[in-house]
Structure formats: C-alpha cells, structure tokens
Amino acid sequence: TQLLEQSPQFLSIQEGENLTVYCNSSSVFSSLQWYRQEPGEGPVLLVTVVTGGEVKKLKRLTFQFGDARKDSSLHITAAQPGDTGLYLCAGQDYGQNFVFGPGTRLSVLP
Amino acid sequence: EAGVTQFPSHSVIEKGQTVTLRCDPISGHDNLYWYRRVMGKEIKFLLHFVKESKQDESGMPNNRFLAERTGGTYSTLKVQPAELEDSGVYFCASSQGQAKNTIYFGEGSWLTVV
C-alpha cells in the first residue's frame, strides 16, 4: 500500500514568515501534485511535478520533487493570510490513480 | 468552461437509507474518479472510470457502494444501505487523456449518516 506522509500536520505562523511543508513516501510516483483546499470546497491544483529533482515556482511558492520521486517539498516565502488553508500532496501511481497525504493545515496570522 | 459539478452538495440521511451522489465531469474528459474523505482521514481513492468502463475499482470499500457511468458522461455513486461510517466528503474528479494530466476536483458531496 502506498502511503504519503506530510509534515507538519499543523502550522501557525505570522504574516511575512517563510515556511516549508514536506511530503514523504517510500514509494516512487510517476508524478506528484500539490493542492490547496479551503473549507467547503474541493482541492484546487497548485502544481504538478514530474521529473526527479524538478523545481517549480508559482509566485511565492516553490515546489521541489525529490531526485528519487518519492518526496516533495513546498516552500512559501513571506506568507500572507490568503495562504491559509489545507495543503495536500498527492502522488500519482502508474495506474493513473492518486494517493493523498493527510494534509498540512496552515494558518497565517496577520 | 464549467468545472466538475457534484450534486447534492450536502446530504443528511438515516442509517439504512439510500443515497445517490451525482458527478458531472468537465465536458470531454474521459477519466472520472471518485474519492472520499471520512472524518480525520486522508482523501482516499474509490474508483476510476475511463469513459463508461471501470478502469480500477480497488478502492471501493464494500458492496454497499455502486458506481455507474452509463454513456460515459455523468457518473453516480449509490450507497445502499448507508451506514454511519459512510459519513464524509465524496469528491469527484475528472481528467483528459493520459496519466500525468491535470485532474480537476469538484467541490464534494458532504454526506452525513445519522
């Protein structure tokens, strides 16, 4: 069974601080996606990483896929209250299905 | 372009009753997925349709759950009879084409079994 772990589970920081969220697995994935989910809504895709070692930037968010395609990180620079939400990583197996991590709940205080 | 839509958005039913959830994928998307999140747990895969065919239903918890996608357009997920542990959020997602393509999630159907 493929499992994804995320750390930390909860994170509360002040506006302007930097943070990193980690997503780890013992399994290799064909791709990995990061989502943000807000209360009452479905997950919204932030990024897909495909190649081992790949780094993608989305404004203040930097995503990295591990060289072995088993782990990933999400770094947010100068966090803002609008970044508050549940961040989910999901690894895609070779059968096209996704395995989700439990999520990191981020709260950015003004 | 309309996104993935799900109906109902919320449902409260009694144990033993039947509930049918509907998902309309993005037009033209052959792949349709059902996922669910029960309280305190991570989002888990239920099944995957490619057009009208079930590609993978390994995540379906038991035979009280029946998913259909007649005609390869919208899909329904029926729970009969519902049990308390079925409470949670049922997400539908769709994608186009091959693996590694973006999948788009609906807002979820929130099911409460009392």
Image (tube, rainbow, N blue to C red):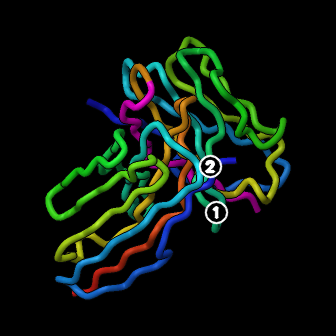
Q: For mark 2, what is the residue?
A: B44
- In the picture, measured across the screen, residue B86 lies left or right of residue A94, that is right
Q: Tell whether position A59 is magenta.
A: no
Which residue lies at the image location 50% right of the left edge and 66% below the top edge? Answer: A6
Q: Position of residue A103 (x, y in %)?
A: 49, 64
In-front residue for pair B66/A30: A30
Among all residues in the image, which is located at the extreme top? B71
| Image coordinates for residue B62, horizontal then vertical, percent | 82, 40
- Disc 2 and disc 1 on one polypeptide chain: yes
Indicate yes or no whether the magenta region holds residue B104. Answer: yes
Report whether residue B99 is seen: yes
* Position of residue B16 in the picture relative to residue A44 (left or right): right
Q: Amino acid at mark 1?
A: Lys
Magenta residues, start to end: B99-114
Residue B53 image position (x, y, % from top left): 62, 15
Above/below status of A100 relative to B60:
below
Residue that mark 1 sits on? B41
Mark 2 chain = B
Q: Amino acid at mark 2?
A: Lys
Crowd class of label 2 (few under 14; some 14 to 19; many from 20; radius 10 Å): many
| Residue at the (29%, 81%) spot, across then down | A108
Q: Is residue A76 above or below residue B18?
A: below
